[in-house]
Amino acid sequence: MTTSSFPIISKPAIEDMETKPNLDYDKVRGNFDWQQMYDELDWLPGGGLNKAHEAIDRHANGRNRDKIAMIWEGKNGEKETYTLRQMKEQSNKFANVLTSLGIEKGDRVFIYMERLPELYFAFFGILKVGAVAGPLFSAFGPDPVKDRMLDSEAKVLVTQPDLRRKITPIIPVLFELQHMVIVNKNNRDPQPLMSGDLSYEEEMSKATANFDTVITSQYDYSIMHYTSGTTGKPKGAVHRHQAVVQQYATGKWALDLQEDDIYFCTADPGWVTGTSYGMIAPWTNGVTQLIYEGGFRASKWYQLIQDYNVTVFYTAPTAIRMLMKAGDDIPGRYDMSSLRFMASVGEPLNPEAVVWGNDVFGMPFHDNWWQTETGAIMCANYACQDVNPGSMGRPIPGVELGIVDDEYNEVPVGEDGNLVVRPTWPSMFHTYWNNTEMYNSRFRKGWYITGDTARVDENGYYWFVGRADDVINTAGHLVGPFEVESALIEHPAVAEAGVIGKPDPIAMEIVKAFVSLKDGYEESTELRRDIMRFSRQKLAAAVAPRELDFVPTLPKTRSGKIMRRLLKARELGLPEGDTSTLEDD
Ligand code: AMP
């Protein structure tokens, strides 16, 4: 049974494949033991484990030291390359800068930057001192930065002049913040440093390139990413160095990374794909990675693939739908013959997009599923297996997935239910920062509850059904409605706000807000625009509402909670369902 009317895309037998895939799924999954992957890592002297050592230093200390690790193209067309040895030296220097600032194991150091090489040097430098790296999405406005910096009590923020200026108003309330290190790439910004800020370039010029990575154990914290839930502010999902085991393994199996690959991952390090698969997985696998600072432009992406001979391409469904919209003729204008494997993550990948890849590039997009909390790919379509368009594929070796009902009992094959994972897997998050209660609430009857609904077919392929909560997935970014509502009600005219995800053909969902006004304010196009502008400035264009309707009141439960489900049903003209908890008008 499949749930897609699209035919299966068959693959030749492994023996007949030109590039032999890293994984023979059926062979490996049956008697797999994670120890095999632990043994493939280098480990620190004395048995410690550190992601920076596995990704950078172990290669830089060996025969691949002069191999290009990073090919960088800036948004203004600048081009730079860095070998593994240079990556090691630069990250060592930054580790020395942090040490000189008094940063120690366990401290949080956050990065709020665009995709510049220095972001990557800083990231690995943070890991080398044993601190916890927190990358923030550079398009965020001051509010999301403030929430995350306050919650994590980060001591250092590495940023750029323009982003520094953007968040100036929140700096006085960040009581734990001790230093801001400003990267002025290629002197792009002519203005002098703000008082108290440190120049990255100056600090790096004083630092030496020798540094002994602080011994971290596999259980020490390494990275935190904030992710949205249904209620409250985003939570910091904390990962340990141990996650590198699964990031390495899945880079090999689900992305089929091989030594000579040129890999292009379009995710930003502000989101988990950008660290797990934009840093750790590719470099632990020793491949050359293309990093492009600029945003989406179909012809530019095709040109990058052509110019740098990209072989493996990992992107997201919204981007694929935008490529489809740009037209089938554009890829034909470029030489795409270097490509040999394409994968996608972050949202449901519609079967049409999988088939489109096959028609236009001669290979399907391989969808895979995972989330911030899982730290690494959990379910995938593999190079070695037929692709079932519309399916997220099969669990990676060593991972057990399940589909359960609301009492956490497994449901029969083919039935919809909650997608759950059997703890523990190596890249499992270890806590939500300062929120153990919320962390514990994600585990029930021996399962980790993902918040997604799905079904599995008799061949073991998983099919995404939806989210079990109100979290919105817009262009692959999870948006918590509460965070947007909180920003909206800070506008002087707004009394109450309710936010939903509205289906959209490209971005899957867009953020839609319903707003009731305070007495004395009149609905008008201008006010609507003003509220939307206000929320964009506070949050980020990617997170702020794209549509806003004025309503006299919002539907609420008797206990005062906004009934987003009802707002959504009304917006989409669907049945309103159970309204017994609706407060009386
Ligand atoms: P994040 O934690 O921001 O990476 O978002 C994870 C969520 O994105 C998952 O829980 C799903 O709701 C969604 N997601 C990720 N990958 C897929 C996929 N392949 N198909 C459908 N939804 C996905």
Image (cartoon, grey):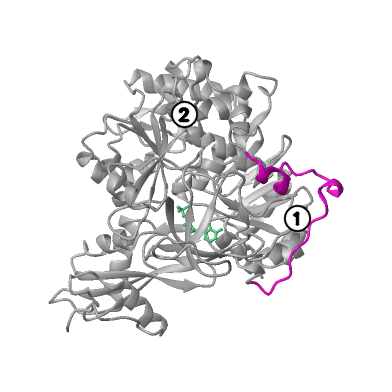
Q: Is residue 497 left or right of residue 421?
A: left
Which numbered dot is residue 42? none
- Residue pointed to by mark 2: 218
Magenta stretch, overall SS: loop
Residue 214: x, y in percent? 44, 19
Q: Is mark 1 within 8 Å of ligand 1?
A: no
The magenta-colored residue range is: 4-32
Please indicate whether residue 447 sits to the left or right of residue 551 in the image.
Answer: right
Q: Residue furthest right?
A: 16
In the structure shown, which secondary structural element does the residue marked by tag 2 occupy?
loop
Q: CA distance from mark 1 to mark 2?
A: 44 Å
Q: Is residue 226 left or right of residue 492?
A: right
Which amino acid does the dot numbered 1 rest on? Tyr
Residue 11 drawn in magenta: yes
Is residue 255 at all visible to an observer of this figure?
no
Q: Earlier in the sequence, mark 1 or mark 2?
A: 2
The structure residue drawn at horizontal position 32% and vertical position 43%, both measured from the top left corner, is 165
Picture quarter with the N terminus: bottom right
Is there any visible trace of residue 192 in the rendered image?
yes
Looking at the image, residue 578 lies above or below residue 141 = below
Q: Is mark 2 within 8 Å of ligand 1?
A: no
Vertical relation: 216 (above or below) 488: above
Image height of 215 relative to 54, above or below: above
Q: Position of residue 31 (x, y in %)?
A: 66, 41
Q: Which residue sits at x=43%, y=22%?
A: 95
- The label number, if any, that marks residue 334 in the structure image: 1
The residue at the point 64 percent across, 40 percent down is 32
